Image: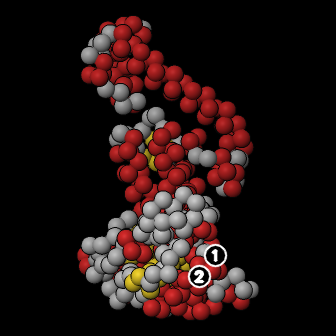
């Protein structure tokens, strides 16, 4: 691992708030260095990156390292709202502007005064709304839906997309003036497959988070699982890795994450159904069933003996040392049954 990137990264972390953005790969370090340089300038930033690469985290880091940090950070996903609703979320509306508008309501542009608004999936914003956003960026002015009143707002806009915007502009799918207005500084988040050396770090981080969340201790990952994860392409990027680790932690009863708890598509892509593994899904399923049975059987015995381990061993007909080992393996606390 290149130590110069490590030292760059450490310097960045000492100077700035970079919560949750993990990695020493030169590609991510470069993005962060540029992000930090523009964080407090107030410049409009356009973040490019595939789905799951951490665009919202990066936008939040820009906000946290700017003079707006004490005001709101509002992430809005333009693809998640019907057109009309997105407009009233942003600009607010006047009473009677549409059916159900019983009173005036302010939108995020007003509500997040002095803060930062992230417009994610900006390419999904309808053309009429793109025109209104352009006006906001040029003049700071807007009108609530159903109103002629002109309001002013002081917010920083950050846009994000997983699409090729210049291409969309060429095809007429995105307003050219808005694109040029947004594209002052562009930050390109690399996909996970282009920064593989960060995968072990990310695994370690998510493992810690989900062990805490699920109340499990000292979970380790088997070398096989590590190898599969480090060679996988992660079309869903960091979000996909995070979901996989959560699944593994939730499904593991012992203290080691084995291949059997990985999603099958990972094994297929990795050609891990070689002869030895072709036999093993059955064996692994059987092993898992045995572990689950053992765990719940031991819990039942401990319930019956009110947490008395030596009595539980007699009931189960196994040696007390053996039972102690199993209690440790399954992380069962006998005191809970007293």
Name the foreground residue: 21 vs 127: 127
Q: Quadrant of the C terminus?
A: top left
Is there CB contact under 8 Å for labels 2 and 1? yes
Distance from disc 2 to disc 1, alpha carbons, whole Å, reads 6 Å
Name the foreground residue: 47 vs 20: 47
Crowding around mark 2 (Cα neighbors within 10 Å: few <14, some 14 to 19, many 20+) is some
Q: Position of residue 259 (x, y in %)?
A: 57, 44
Residue 130: mark = 2
- Residue drawn 39% across the image and 7% down it: 315
- Residue 167 visible in the displayed image: no
Label 2: which secondary element: helix
Judged from this view, the residue extending furthest toward the front is 96
- Residue drawn 57% across the image and 88% down it: 178
Question: 287 above or below 275?
Answer: above
Name the foreground residue: 268 vs 224: 268
Colour mapping used in the image: secondary structure
Q: Position of residue 23 (x, y in %)?
A: 42, 70
Check disc 1 and report the residue beneath it.
126
Label 1: which secondary element: loop
Question: 195 above or below 296?
Answer: below
Crowding around mark 1 (Cα neighbors within 10 Å: few <14, some 14 to 19, many 20+) is some
**Quarter residue 70 falls in:** bottom left
Q: Is 25 situated left or right of 229 in this image?
A: left
Q: Is 76 situated left or right of 268 in this image?
A: left
- Residue drawn 70% across the image and 36% down it: 279
**Quarter residue 232 falls in:** bottom right
- Residue drawn 34% across the image and 67% down it: 19
- Residue 111 visible in the displayed image: yes
Q: Position of residue 169 (x, y in %)?
A: 67, 87
Q: Quadrant of the N terminus?
A: bottom left
Q: Position of residue 184 (x, y in %)?
A: 49, 91
């Amino acid at each position: 691992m290149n130590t110069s990137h490590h030292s760059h990264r450490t310097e960045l972390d000492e100077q700035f708030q970079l919560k949750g953005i993990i990695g020493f790969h030169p590609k991510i370090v470069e993005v962060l260095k540029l992000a930090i340089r523009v964080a407090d300038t107030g410049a409009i930033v356009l973040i490019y990156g595939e789905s799951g690469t951490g665009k919202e985290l990066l936008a939040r880091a820009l906000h946290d390292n700017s003079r707006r940090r004490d005001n709101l950070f509002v992430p809005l996903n333009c693809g998640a709202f019907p057109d009309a609703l997105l407009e009233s979320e942003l600009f607010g509306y006047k009473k009677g502007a549409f059916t159900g508008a019983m009173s005036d309501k302010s939108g995020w542009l007003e509500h997040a005064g002095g803060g930062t608004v992230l417009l994610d999936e900006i390419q999904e914003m309808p053309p009429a709304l793109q025109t209104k956003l352009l006006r906001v960026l040029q003049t700071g002015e807007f009108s609530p839906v159903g109103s002629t009143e002109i309001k002013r707002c002081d917010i920083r806009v950050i846009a994000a997309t997983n699409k090729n915007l210049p291409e969309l502009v060429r095809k007429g799918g995105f307003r050219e003036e808005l694109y040029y207005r947004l594209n002052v500084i562009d930050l390109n988040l690399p996909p996970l497959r282009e920064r593989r050396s960060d995968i072990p770090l990310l695994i370690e981080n998510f493992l810690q988070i989900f062990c805490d969340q699920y109340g499990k201790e000292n979970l380790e990952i088997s070398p096989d699982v590590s190898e599969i994860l480090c060679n996988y392409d992660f079309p869903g990027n960091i979000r996909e890795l995070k979901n996989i680790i959560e699944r593994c932690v939730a499904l593991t009863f012992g203290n080691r994450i084995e291949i059997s708890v990985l999603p099958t598509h990972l094994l297929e892509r990795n050609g891990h159904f070689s002869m030895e593994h072709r036999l093993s899904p059955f064996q692994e399923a059987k092993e898992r069933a045995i572990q689950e049975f053992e765990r719940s059987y031991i819990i039942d015995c401990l319930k019956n003996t009110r947490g008395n381990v030596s009595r539980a061993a007699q009931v189960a007909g196994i040696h007390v040392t053996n039972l102690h080992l199993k209690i440790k393996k399954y992380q069962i606390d006998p005191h809970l049954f007293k």
